[in-house]
Structure formats: C-alpha cells, structure tokens
Amino acid sequence: MVEYLQNTPSVKECLLPVAIKAEYNILAAENLLIEKPACVSFRNDGSASFDQKGAYVVLDFGKELCGGVRIIACGMAHTAQFRIALGESLTEACSTIGQKNATNDHSPRDFTALVPGLSDLTFGMSGFRFARLELLTETAVHIRNIFAVNTLPYFEKEGTVNTSDEELNRIIHTAAYTLKLNLQNGFIWDGIKRDRLVWAGDLHQEVLLSYYLYGDNANIRNSLEFLQGQTPANAWINGIPSYSAWWVINLCDYCRLSGNREFFQKHQAYAEAVIENFDQCTDQYGEMDFSSAPHFMPYFLDWPTADTPDAKIGTAALIVYMARKYLQQADNVHCRLLIDKLSGYLDMQCQYKQTRAFQILAGRKAEGESAFLEKNGAEGFSTFMAYYILKADAMAGGQNMLPIIKQYFGGMLSRGATTFWEDFHIDWLEGSGRIDQFPTAEQKDIHGDYGAFCYEGFRHSLCHGWASGVLAFIIEYMMGLSLEQGECCRIEPHMWGVKELQAKLPVKDGWLAVSIRGNQTEVKTVQ
C-alpha cells in the first residue's frame, strides 16, 4: 500500500487556556482556567456562565497549536450558537473577516458552531493560539471546559539539540516545534493555518530538518511523490519553474542523507526529464524561456526578490545549484550543459542577500562575500532564505552568524512568537507590540499591520515550516554534522563562543550522541 494511504500516527493533547485576555457578561469566567474532570455533567457548579447574547471570552492557550476548540457544555435545555474566531495573534482572534485581510482561506478560523446541552464537541481545525467565543443566542449557557486540541505527529524517534546558551535554546526549540506542527497527515505542510499544501521550494529546509530530528520518515517520501504525481515532467511543479528545480534538490538531499538508492532510482527518470526540460528552456547564451508550460511567474527565488532583477539571477543560480546537486548522485549531460550556460549569472551584481547566497551556493567564489551578507546584521533576511544566507556566510568565513540569528529569530520571540513566521523583517520591531497583547494607540500591530504579497495582514501565517531551517543550519554548522547514507561522516563544530552543546539525533543504526564542551568533542553511536 502507498505510504500516504496508511494510517498516520498522531497524538492529540488537550490544553487548558493559560489566560483570559478579555471577557464580557460572563459569570465566573476564571473557572475556564481551572483543571477539572473533562466530562459532561448535569451540575453547573464550576462552570462559566455566558449570561446573555453577545457575551464573549478571549482565551490564550499559551502556544501555537494545530487543531480546534473543544467545548464541554453543562445541563441546558436548548442548543446554543457560538461564533468561534481563532487567531495566531490576539488581534487576529478579535478581528472580523476582511478586517486587515483576515480570511478563512484554507482552514476556516472564523465560524459559527451549534453547542447542544450536555455535549462534548470539538470545532475547527486551523493554526491558532487564541480563541474568541461569543454567544449568539439569547438564553444563558453554562460551559464547563474550553480546551484547545493540538494535533501532533508521532515518531518513534525524536532528536534533540541543547546548548549552554538559553536564548539560542529558545530559538532551537521554537524551530523544532515549528517543523513538528507542519508534519501532518503523512505529509510536510507549508503552514497550519494557511498553505496546508506541499510546496516544493518551501519543502527543502523541512526535508533536511525532519531527517535530522526524526530520521528517515514517510512524510518526506510522500511529499515528493505527491508533487511528482500532480505534475508531468514537462510542466512546472506548483506552477513555478524554480519549484521543479527545488523538487530535484529535495530528491537529491533526501537520498544523500538516507542512502535510499531505490527511491532515487524510482524517481530518476522524472528528475532527468525535469532537468532536460530546463536545458531545453535555456539557450546557448543563458537566456531562459519557461513559456513552454503555464506558470505563475517565470523567475522566483523568494517573495522579497519577486519582480526585481534579482529574481532572474536567483532563479539561474538555483538551477545551477540543482544541477550540481544532481551530479553528486548521477552523471547527466543536461546538468553539465546548464552549468555551462547559466554560470555567468553567478558573477552578476545583485541587490539582495538571498541572491548572493545562491550565487555562492551554486559556485561563486565565497571569499570576501561575508561583508555583503552580514551588512546591517539581519536586515534583508526572509524566513524562507535565512538558512541559505547563513550557510553562504559560513562558506565565506563569516563570524557573526550567532548575533544575526539572535537578532532575527530572537526578534520574533521578543514579540511573543512560539513558532516562526512566514516572513519577518527586523524593521517591524520598531514601535510594534507583542502578538499576545492588544497594541496601544501608539503601537503597530505586528501581525495585522505588516506583511506583503500573498501574506498581507492577518492572512500572514505565524507558523510556517520553511522558517524552521535555522535549526538545520545550527546542526550542520555550529554542531558541524556531516550526515550521509544515514550515518555520521564527521563532526566539525564551530561553537561561536557557546560553551556547550549536547545533541541526540536518530541515525540508521540507532542514535548519534554528540557532546561538545569547549575544544572537546565526544561522538558515539548508541542503540
């Protein structure tokens, strides 16, 4: 049976709210914060009473969740109707559809629900941390419990990384949790509120990190096979030419890490047809024409560079990067032709750090490029491209990766993030409030007032899998892990002044245990 047709193990956790952010016409709302038996009862004691139509409560469950809201109603002789609005930020939960681009796209997060008497029901399936529940009917209602139900994947093995730097640990653990929430139903999603899709480019850092943390898992294979099954080789995956290149990169990196040659050979003909299609779309002067198949945009590296001259340069560099990746797995004449025809783009001047990063990753000489990549710290970073900028900076001998990581990812944490976002710019920090507080009159709403392109305002996802790649970089560079064929090849740490690092990661024959203290590194494989 195909892997994604099998039952995918998952666990559900029920979480009490940790705080009441607002309430109106509710008697004993504080009872919703008290742990009590989660069972329907004829008795109303210990419940919260919504006294009349329009009564509402806004709850904070303490962290980003993938799931819905479970309501346990006490004895009542009628069915009540509630408006339930979920939000990744407090302000999103308190918005209405259309306000600051609040939507129900992909997973409804603002809807009405019927709550009968003596009921225990769960409503909704979205990405959220906050919930606003408003009574829409006239008669008073007694609610015993309101839980958030969080759906998480289950893996037999789960790797861990910890350091002696607490701020860095928060970044590490937030990245790991961001990834975990997006490993759903046997696939790797892009986001849990919006973009519950498999996007080939967005997938790459999740493929790397899910392998590092969970070992060889079906979510990777399912996602790659699903994308292939949706797209003929002469079309563009996800409707974006560069995403077909990303699919090939994902295949190569998965097979490099796992050593699964059978999977590579199963998909080799498709990969080579994609590569040949790129070659046919590129003339001898390196001019690319992708009009042979419909697409959303001809050149795409990431959203900040879209519709700029960097988009074309970045796309060419990405295709060269793909060709070099593939040649590590198998010889291919079209890869060699693409490298020859497109390498001129690697020396072109560019404006954005992510473009320069891919020029370096694709073969541009890295020496002397650190100044460009580290200029003004994390300015110009995007959550999609942070991993690649950091990796190119390491290749260029950069020395400021840790301060930049703290500035960028720590910036999101400083605004209340418990997962990393679809996008973030450090200039959003100036004058903005936290996502778990109502902004004052002088403050910007960091969720509703920012964002661009397809993620303006509240449509912006605050849990996006591609933003987890910072942990993959920490594993590959700070810890210095080189993993191939399911086994550790070497550990070459770069500790950035951090005194200790402890890691336990799944490998083919058990667990890889790594302990780094100062200049001392201990590595062993345990069962």
Image (tube, grey):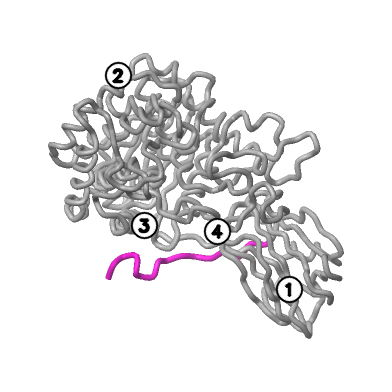
Give the residue number, with chain letter if any, for mark 4.
66
Query: Gap in Å between the C-alphas at discs 1 and 2?
Result: 64 Å
SS at mark 4? strand
Callout 1: few (<14), some (14-19), or many (20+) C-alpha neighbours within 10 Å? some
Which range is magenta? Answer: 1-16
Q: Taking the image as drawn, is residue 212 in sight?
A: no
For residue 365, the mark is 2
Mark toward the viewer: 1 or 3: 1
Q: CA distance from mark 2 to mark 4?
A: 43 Å
Residue 35: image x %, image y %? 71, 66
Q: Is residue 372 left or right of residue 224?
A: right
Residue drawn at 65 percent across, 54 percent down: 87
Residue type (three-letter) at the residue carrying disc 2? Lys
The residues bearing labels 1 and 3 have C-alpha atoms spaced at a distance of: 38 Å
Q: Which residue is mark 3?
A: 219
Nearer-N-terminus badge (4/1) = 4
Rounded to the nearest whole Å, what is the CA distance between mark 4 and mark 3? 17 Å
Q: Which residue is mark 1?
A: 81
Q: Nearer the viewer, mark 1 or mark 2?
A: 1
